[in-house]
Amino acid sequence: MAKLEINGKPVSIDAEPDTPLLYVLRDDLKLNAAKFGCGLGQCGACTVLVDGEPTLSCVTPIELLEGKKVTTLEGLGTAQAPGVLQRAFIEEQAAQCGYCIPGMMMRAAALLKKVPKPTDAQIREALVPNLCRCGTHMRIIRAVRRASQS
Ligand code: FES
Ligand code: FES
């Protein structure tokens, strides 16, 4: 049993210690924003924040998360009340298939927390671990820049 906080709420997880956080989020808690891409820590689709740091939830076992604070895209806002980053992505239409976008937004959220007004170079560097197969990079960068200006 692991006790942690997810999107500000205390949660007890009854799962095998080596269960990846991504499976717990999607299968047990029905928090489906984080995506299963490669399952190998190589694409970033599953990125969430753990104590504010971008973390690949597909390769993070639940046993490492005792007492930690996890934030998923659901913690940044809702469809009815989107957060700043979510609004910026909508306004810039920064998605094609959309599969990579939740991970991109979580990594961008971590960047904006540390560097509220990043340069384009800093945005690019921060997003390097997250892949987009649709070639939406320029819109994604514009969306993060827009969020940093609002
Ligand atoms: S699904 Fe986790 S890095 Fe690809
Ligand atoms: S929008 Fe399709 S993978 Fe990025």
Image: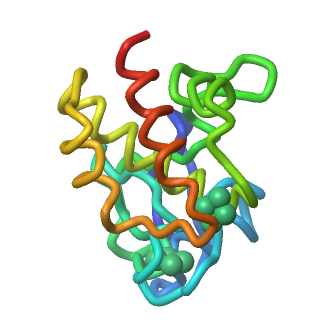
The residue depicted at 19 percent of the width and 29 percent of the height is 115
Tally of numbered tags: 0
Quarter of the view holding residue 28: bottom right
- Quarter of the picture containing the C terminus is top left
Q: How is the image coloured?
A: rainbow
Q: Is residue 25 visible?
A: no
The residue depicted at 59 percent of the width and 51 percent of the height is 102
Quarter of the view holding residue 76: top right
The residue depicted at 68 percent of the width and 54 percent of the height is 33
**Could you say which is closer to the camera, residue 7 or residue 112?**
112
**Could you say which is closer to the camera, residue 23 or residue 39?**
39
The residue depicted at 46 percent of the width and 84 percent of the height is 17
- Would you place residue 63 above or below residue 38 in this image? above
- Would you place residue 105 above or below residue 2 in this image? above
Q: Is residue 118 visible?
A: yes
- Would you place residue 24 above or below residue 40 in this image? above
Q: Residue 133 in the image: state x and y as whole percent.
A: 59, 72
Q: From the viewer's perspective, tell me whether residue 82 is left or right of residue 133.
A: right
Q: Residue 67 in the image: state x and y as whole percent.
A: 34, 53
Q: Residue 2 in the image: state x and y as whole percent.
A: 47, 66
Q: Residue 62 in the image: state x and y as whole percent.
A: 45, 73
- Would you place residue 105 above or below residue 114 in this image? below
